[in-house]
Structure formats: structure tokens, C-alpha cells
Amino acid sequence: MADSASGEERRGSKRRKRSRRMNPDGTMTLIEHIYEFRRRLGFALLALVAGGIIGFIWFQTTIGPIPSLGKLLTDPYCAVPAERRFDGPTGGCKLLQTVPFEAFMTQLKVGLAGGAVLFSPVWLYQIWAFVAPGLYSKERKYALTFVAFASLLFAGGAVLAYLLVPHALELLMNFGGDQFITALTADKYVSFILSLLLIFGVSFELPLLVVMLNRVGVLKYQTLKKWRRGLIMVVFVFAAFATPGSDPFSMLGLSAALIVLLELSIQIARFHDRKLDKERGTEGWDKLADDEAAPFDYTPSTIDDEPSAATNGKRTNTDDVT
């Protein structure tokens, strides 16, 4: 029974590969969609597992000029003056382990996060390879642009957060004066660092969201201009509640960066709306009444005429029309 099932599975795999060769336009049934999703998901999970293993090893290993993940993680903590942190009887800059498996779980958590970032091109490509066949060429161009800018903004936010961590830690650990000395556990410290990087990275996607809503016509420049002061106030309130530790360095750093990015997105919306108004003025659409139809040519073509590439709904050669 097992051999029969295995043989049937191999024959099914050969049929799917043969159908792809005989089906160049990429048309797929629902079952083929599920097979393709399972295949892409498997590759993405393998990439994450491989990245996690490499990240776990990298935590304590220096690769040429690249410092270990553990050193990158503890550098902000070690930048705090020695009299403000607990170094233990042997000195040095170390984090505390209060339970037996805390060091292992910390290394595993950091390794998985680092591996996911390191292998992000692989699993992001698997997502793109599954989605792209169902998009028009213009939609694919917009999607690639969106992903590229989103990745750059997220990385920029994470880098800014990493640079602010030493100042935030020094300020927070100075409260209490000489009556207190801070001894950070590995779990608490890593959670603080990762949450700060994640919050800054996700927050930096705000201008991309504003530009996208402007492109689809939901938010106009005049609306954004009218809401500018209110949006700035919302940014300050969001930064105050979102940053872990609520220290002024993280809050002001996130607020200042988001205000600059927000203003940049508003100006992009301004140029986009100005260009759109100019195109509408050239076509004469700006002079039409609200209930007046646009001057489109509704004359039907004859049966013998071939539809143009702009109207035949043609997609890419890898189109998925299901």
C-alpha cells in the first residue's frame, strides 16, 4: 500500500510538471494552486530554518571582520558607564542568567531573528513567486517598488533604534543615583532591544502608507495639508506610548524621524496631485460637471478588428487566471 501511494505521488508530480510545460500561459486549477502554495511555503520554511541555524552559530562566532551577534547585541549595554551596571565579581560586561535555560533560549531567539533577516531575500522571493503570476505588468512594477522602499524604510528605522539604545539605556539606568545599580537579565534585555528595533522599523512604514493612499485617491494633498498639525500631534502621542521604556531619547528620536518622513510623504502627494490636475486639465475633464459623463469613445469595434494590447486584458506569460 505504501509503495502504491508513493508511486501515485510520483506520477502526480510528473503530471504537474508536464502540465506546466504544456501550459505556457500559467493557467492553474485550484488544486494546482494548493500544490504551488505548499511548495513555496516549504522553501520559505527551509530558508527560515537554515537561517536560524546559521544565526544560532553566529551568536558566538566572529566571521572575519563581522562581529558576532552576541557582541552586536551587548555593545549598547556595554557602552553604558561601568559604575551604572552590574559587572559581577570578575568584571567585564555580561548579562545575567536567572534560570538554567535562559542563555540557550536567548541565543535561539536572537539566532532566529538574525537568520530571518539574513535569509529574507529567499523567503521574500518565495512569496513574490507565488503572487506575481496573478499580477499585470504594471501591478508587478508597483509591487516591486513598494517592497523595495518598505525594506529600506524598515532597515533605516531599525538602524536608528540601534543607535539610540545606548543613550536610552544610560538615561534609564541613571535614575535613582547611587542608591541603585542595574543588573539586566538576558531575556529582558533582548526583548527590549528586539521590540525597539521592530517598533522603529514598522513605524517607518508610515510615509509609504500615506503615499499609497494618495496614489489610489483616498488621501488628497489638500486633506493632508489640513490635517498636518493633527498628524504631528498623533505622531508624538504614538511615539510616547509605542517606545519601550518611555525614555525621552527613543520617543524624541522616533517622533522627529516620523515627522520628517510624514512631511516628505505630504510633499510627494503634493507633486502627484499637481501632476494629476495638470493631466485632467489637458484632457478637459476638470471642466465637466459632477453629473456629466467623460468624453470616452464608446463606438464598438467590428468583429474583424483585433483588440489592442491596452484593452485585451493580456497579462504576463506566467499569468494565473484562476
Image (cartoon, rainbow, N blue to C red):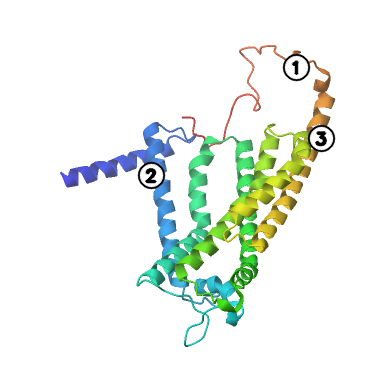
Q: Which residue is mark 1?
A: 294
Q: Position of residue 290 (x, y in %)?
A: 76, 16
Q: Which residue is mark 2?
A: 38
Q: Which residue is mark 3?
A: 274
Left or right position of 153 against 223: left
* Marks 3/1: CA–CA distance: 20 Å
Left or right position of 277 against 166: right
* Disc number lying in front (3 or 2): 3
Left or right position of 70 against 302: left
Question: Reading the chain from its start, which is encountered first: label 3 or label 1?
Answer: 3
From the viewer's side, name the closer residue of 199 and 184: 184
Q: Secondary structure at mark 3?
A: helix
Q: Quadrant of the N terminus?
A: top left
As shown in the figure, which amino acid type bears the numbered disc 2?
Arg
Give the residue drawn at x 36%, y 39%.
Answer: 16
As shown in the figure, which amino acid type bears the numbered disc 3?
Arg
